[in-house]
Every structure is written in structure tokens, then in C-alpha cells.
Amino acid sequence: MKFNTKTIHGGQEHDPAYGSVMPPIYQTSTYAQSTPGGHKGYEYSRTHNPTRNALENAFASIENGKHGLAFGSGLAAIDAVIKLLEPGDEVVSTNDLYGGTYRLFTSIFKKFGIKFHFIGMENVSNIERYINEKTKLIWVETPTNPMMNIIDIKATAAIAKKHQLLLAVDNTFATPYLQRPLDLGADIVMHSATKYIGGHSDLVMGALIVKDKDLADRLYFIQNASGAVCGPQDSFLALRGIKTLHIRMQRHCENGRAVAEFLNNHPKIEAVYWPGFESHPNHDIAKAQMNDFGGMVSFTTKGNNYEEAIKIVENLKIFTLAESLGGVESLAGHPASMTHASIPKEEREKTGVVDSLIRLSVGIEDEEDLIADLKQAIG
């Protein structure tokens, strides 16, 4: 199947009970057994649930993986990946990453003896300087949050393979519509399915997708043992979201381009971060590994004034000032005080998350309305 068909049919079967076209919501915690161990493949819904299984099959299909896992949040999915490691192991991670990921790494897992190196990965040759015999994992976001930095997945995968390391890629911003990291050599793909995959700002969920069965079995064990699974109602909503992922992403990309070009020509805007610009760092890599450039745009104002940035996001009317991203509605955020507040000011400013930085999740509304809203808010 081609991608657009996979979003609707990939990994899916009609429900065997009554032929339901959409997977039913199996809102149950447990399942009747005819004799101890005599069941129809389901014993307890933390371990398996038919609605969640349908979703996990869809996850695997759209990422060209073989095994999908659904979690109660994106951070729960990341948590499961780090639980593959042991005390003394080391991780090389991009330094420009979601604040919640940074907090999980440094405030939770660091005290269990796992060491993290946060480095710029725009030049992948920088990665090998931090690899030693204790390194077990490379963690990549691309495009990164919120600076939209692009990391070469194929080249990073070659480094990981050379040193027998796992490569995990957070593919939340791009979605499998734009790039499929497993095809580029990654071992694990992670999504905050809360975002574009769900697509309607009505669920919180995480996903992992892998090809290797042994790795999948280790992750399934962690998923069941730790229990951070999503429920059947959210699984149903995510399945419904996946079915329109391709058409939503097409419009997100079209509107993202229009907004980025408007901001880039605005006299009060200092810099615009969007991978589609030829001047964007690693634009050629983005062009090679992505099918388009997405609907996430960040920008800074001239003078880098904190109060001015706050005033802009408060004045927006169609863009909603809110955490998160990837819904059909346009959202605006101020990373320094919102999504990246958990990263120390000195650390976040090293990566470009300055006081005036505003991050936009460009929705699927009429582009003229979005541009008019930005125009009046910026003044």
C-alpha cells in the first residue's frame, strides 16, 4: 500500500464479531476464561486490549515498522526506551529537544546512574566524539523543538551501526507523512501521538515503532511491567485521527509555508526558523529525508524583548495561546516560559531558545485568516 492508503487500511481488519468497519472500543479491564489460561488472546487490558492492538498495528504500518506500542503519553514512551538501559550506560542526545524529554533524562534517569551528553548534532561528525564503551543509545529529534534544526538520520544511523548502538528518533514534528526514520536506519521511532497523529487536541498518547522482534519483545515487557498504557477510548480516537493524517498534513505544510514566508518578510521579525527556507541550516538534508517541511514555525522579534513577545501571543485571536501542537487548530507558544521552562535559561539560550522566541503550530484554517491574525498581533 502507498502511504495515503495505509493511514486508512494499514494493519487493520474488520472486527471479527460483527464485521464492524471501525475497531470497536473494548471498554473492559478483563476477559472471561473458559479454564485457567483458556482465553481468546486477551486476559487483562494492561497487557492487551483489542482496540489498542488495532492502534499499535496502525502505528507499525504507517512507519513501515513491524511492531507498534501505544503508551499513555509521549513521555511514557520515552521512559520505556530509557528503561532498556542499565546504571552506568550513556546516551548521546541532541541538545535542542523537548523540555519534558530533557527533564525526564536529567531529573529522573540521571539519578539512576545513566549519563546523558547533550550536544549539537547539525554536524553528525560531532557525535562520535562523545561515544565510548559505555554508550548504548543515540537520541535524536528532527526537526527539533523548537528551533527546527535538522539532523541527518541516515548518517546518524551509520554511526550507530558502526558502534553497535541503538538509534531512537523522535518523529513527532515530521510525522510519518513527511519522514520515516526506520527506512533511514533508525532502530526505534517515537511519537507524541497527542500531536499530529491524534490531530484534534483531544487525547494524550505516546507511540514506539520498531522492526526488530527481539527489541520489540523487550519493549513490550517494559510496557506491560511498568503499565503506562493508553485506554481504549483514546486508542479509538487516535485510530480515527490516523485516517486523516495525510490530508491534514498536506494542509499543515501549505499553511506553514505561507506563514513562514509572511514572517520572513515582516520588518519587525528578526529570524524565522522553518526547514523549507534554503537558508535554513541543513535545508538540503531536510529536502532529502523529508517529503515537505511541516507546519511548525518559530520566530524571534527584533530587539529580543520578552514583554513584546508576551504581548504578541496575548494579542492573537485565531492562534490559541496553549501548550502542545499538531491539532487542526493553530496554536502559539512561548517556549521560554512554557514548553522549555524546565530547561535552565543559560542552557536553553545556548540552543537559541531566547526570551522573544515564539513557536507556532500552524493549523488547517484558511491561510489568509492566519496571516491577518499574525499581522494584527505583531502590529
Image: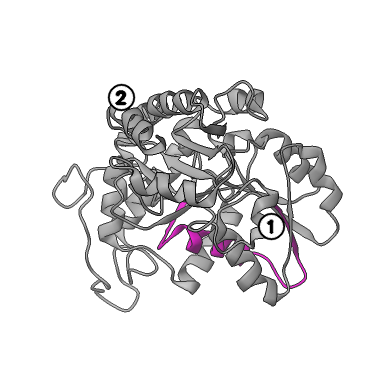
Residue pictured at 23% horizontal, 49% vertical:
23
Q: Give left or right: position of 316 versus 27.
A: right
**Mark-to-mark CA distance, 2 and 1:** 37 Å
| Magenta highlight range | 67-94
Residue 82 counted in the magenta span: yes
Q: Amino acid at mark 2?
A: Glu
The residue tagged 1 is: 347
Question: Could you classify mark 1 by the number of other residues whose Cα lies within 10 Å: few (under 14), some (14-19), or many (20 or more)?
Answer: few
Relative to residue 11, is residue 52 depicted above or below?
Answer: below
Label 2's element? helix
Q: Is residue 58 magenta?
A: no
In the image shown, does 199 or 41 lie closer to the viewer? Answer: 199
Q: Amino acid at mark 1?
A: Glu
Looking at the rendered image, the quarter that the N terminus falls into is: top left
Quick check: 107 above or below 149?
below
How many marks do you count on the picture? Answer: 2
Residue 102: image quadrant is bottom right
Q: Residue at x 51, y 25 (%)?
A: 291
The spot of residue 288 in percent (x, y) is 61, 23
- Using a 10 Å C-alpha cutoff, classify the residue at mark 2 as few (fewer than 14 neighbours), some (14 to 19) or many (20 or more): few
Residue 105 falls left or right of residue 72: right
Say which label, 2 or 1, has the lower sequence index: 1
Residue 329 location in percent, x, y?
A: 30, 41
- Could you say which disc has been placed on residue 368 in the image? 2
Question: Residue at horizontal 38%, vertical 27%?
Answer: 255
The C terminus, quarter of image: top left
**Front position in the image: 315 or 118:** 315
Residue closest to the far left = 18
